[in-house]
Image (cartoon, grey):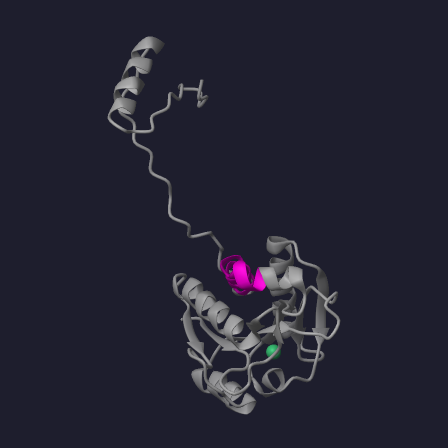
């Protein structure tokens, strides 16, 4: 079974970046938990560095992922900056790590295209969680909590962000991504050659409180 380790950045006494009335640690956690659900639904075994608001040391996060035997590690963060015009997504990998770079690029591209966010690109950094993990690893900065536009996405588009991240991970693992939105079920009550008969039934249904429409066999609603 494929194992993915998700690391919600910060937590507990460490709130991470602050801005727009939001705390980075809260956004990181709710996105990480949702990404975990989406991956679990695809049959992937998921472990988290934290599933509630607690402080976890950076070295412990990496040790947990190594102990779990994860095939892939993703740390989830939001950016912050003193200038509120700074915005966009960037994803980090460990320097000269080609697998980490590929993972980072797939996640970066997926978020940028799904949410139409500013693309700050894939970058290299000697972050502890990237350095100390044994498996391909990336760290995503999903946007700037200090930017009004990004903060809106971080607060109100978490489902889309989570789906984008899950899609990037699945692309890396070469597992087909399908949106698992439930299908739409339609009910048909009659089929008529003569239009007036169809109209009569629609009227009867409307009287009973049903929102009926006529659709012809060519898929047109007129
Ligand atoms: Zn952070």
Q: Quadrant of the C terminus?
A: top left
Residue 156 among those drawn in magenta: yes
Q: Nearer the viewer, residue 133 or 84?
A: 84
- State which quarter of the image contains the N terminus: bottom left
Question: Hey, which quadrant is residue 206 in on the image?
Answer: top left
The x, y position of residue 10, in whole percent, is: 54, 82
Specify start and end residues of the magenta stretch as a single range: 153-170
Q: Identify the residue at image location x=50%, y=74%.
A: 26
| Residue situated in front as seen by the camera: 24 or 106 | 24
Quadrant in which residue 155 is drawn = bottom right
Is 162 situated left or right of 114 in this image? left
Measured as percent of width and height from the top left, residue 44 is found at 41, 68
Judged from this view, the residue extending furthest toward the front is 21
Q: Give the percent coordinates (x, y) of residue 19.
A: 62, 72
Residue beneath the point at 61% across and 64% down: 151
Residue 102 higher or lower than 73, as above or below: above
The image quadrant where one finds ligand 1 is: bottom right
Which image quarter: residue 23? bottom right
x 46%, y 21%: residue: 220
């Amino acid at each position: 079974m494929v194992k993915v380790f998700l690391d919600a950045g910060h937590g507990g006494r460490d709130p991470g970046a602050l801005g727009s009335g939001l705390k980075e640690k809260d956004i990181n956690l709710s996105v990480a938990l949702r990404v975990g659900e989406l991956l679990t639904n695809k049959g992937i075994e998921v472990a988290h560095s934290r599933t509630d608001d607690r402080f976890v040391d950076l070295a412990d996060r990496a040790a947990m992922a190594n102990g779990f035997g994860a095939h892939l590690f993703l740390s989830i963060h939001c950016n912050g900056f003193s200038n509120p015009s700074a915005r966009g997504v960037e994803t980090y990998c460990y320097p000269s790590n080609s697998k980490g770079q590929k993972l980072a690029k797939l996640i970066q591209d997926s978020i940028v295209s799904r949410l139409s966010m500013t693309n700050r690109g894939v970058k290299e950094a000697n972050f502890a969680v990237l350095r100390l993990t044994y498996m391909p690893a990336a760290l995503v900065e999903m946007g700037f909590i200090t930017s009004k536009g990004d903060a809106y996405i971080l607060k109100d588009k978490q489902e889309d962000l989570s789906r984008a991240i899950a899609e990037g991970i699945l692309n890396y693992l070469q597992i087909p991504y399908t949106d698992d939105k439930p299908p739409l079920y339609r009910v048909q009550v009659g089929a008529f050659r003569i239009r007036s008969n169809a109209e009569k039934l629609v009227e009867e249904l409307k009287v009973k409180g049903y929102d009926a429409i006529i659709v012809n066999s060519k898929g047109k609603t007129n």
